[in-house]
Image (tube, rainbow, N blue to C red):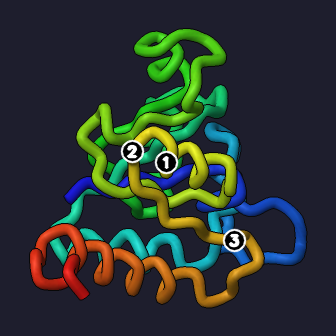
């Protein structure tokens, strides 16, 4: 199953209220802008990959897909695909609604912090795991959400109960 993640306030956390992974080595920071990766992101992606899932990034930010891939690789995170703001705009036009369309790219589940994206998911038919930036045990929450999501999607008996 393809699972995508938003960047801002989902995988990237600014400010002192949320713990982050160690920053890149100073030498790497000379060549790439290092942003604060949320604590647990590497463990979450590793666990999801071990369970056989593809990992994607879907962001409406101005960050370029190549930079996103490179930066995540420096943090030992490999992604299978990136839908950046430019790709989204090319496919659907600037300012189009919904703001994200993961299902169009074959993505089964999108992880995001935005209630607006979750509402768009309900309205336009794509599934969203809503993760509050303040949620400390966010990794366990997402892993359990994915487990429950798979049971609902792939187990006809689970839909009845």
Q: Is 74 on the left-hand or right-hand side of 135?
A: left
Q: Position of residue 145 (x, y in %)?
A: 41, 79
Outermost front residue: 160
The N terminus, quarter of image: bottom left
Please give the residue where the numbered disc 3 appears in the rendered image. Answer: 132
Q: Is 140 on the left-hand or right-hand side of 7?
A: left
Q: Secondary structure at mark 1?
A: helix
Q: Secondary structure at mark 3?
A: loop
Q: Are marks 3 and 1 in contact (CB under 8 Å)?
A: no
The numbered disc on residue 121 is 1
User: Which residue corresponds to the image point at 45% horizontal and 20% vertical from the top-left?
Assistant: 87
Inter-mark Cα distance, 3 to 1 = 16 Å
Q: Secondary structure at mark 2?
A: loop
Please give the residue where the numbered disc 2 appears in the rendered image. Answer: 125
Inter-mark Cα distance, 2 to 1 = 5 Å
Q: Position of residue 134 (x, y in %)?
A: 76, 77
């Amino acid at each position: 199953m393809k699972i995508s993640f938003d960047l801002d306030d989902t995988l990237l956390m600014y400010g002192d209220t949320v713990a982050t992974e160690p920053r890149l080595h100073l030498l790497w920071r000379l060549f790439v802008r290092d942003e604060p990766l949320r604590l647990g992101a590497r463990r979450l992606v590793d666990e999801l990959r071990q369970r056989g899932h593809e990992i994607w990034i879907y962001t409406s930010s101005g960050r370029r897909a190549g930079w996103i891939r490179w930066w995540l690789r420096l943090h030992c995170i490999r992604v299978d695909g990136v839908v950046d703001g430019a790709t989204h705009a090319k496919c659907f036009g600037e300012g189009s609604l919904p703001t994200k369309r993961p299902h169009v790219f074959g993505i089964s589940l999108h992880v995001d912090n935005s209630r607006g994206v979750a509402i768009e998911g309900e309205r336009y038919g794509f599934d969203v795991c809503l993760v509050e930036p303040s949620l400390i045990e966010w990794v366990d929450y997402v892993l359990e959400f994915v487990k429950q999501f798979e049971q609902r999607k792939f187990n006809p008996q689970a839909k009845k109960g």
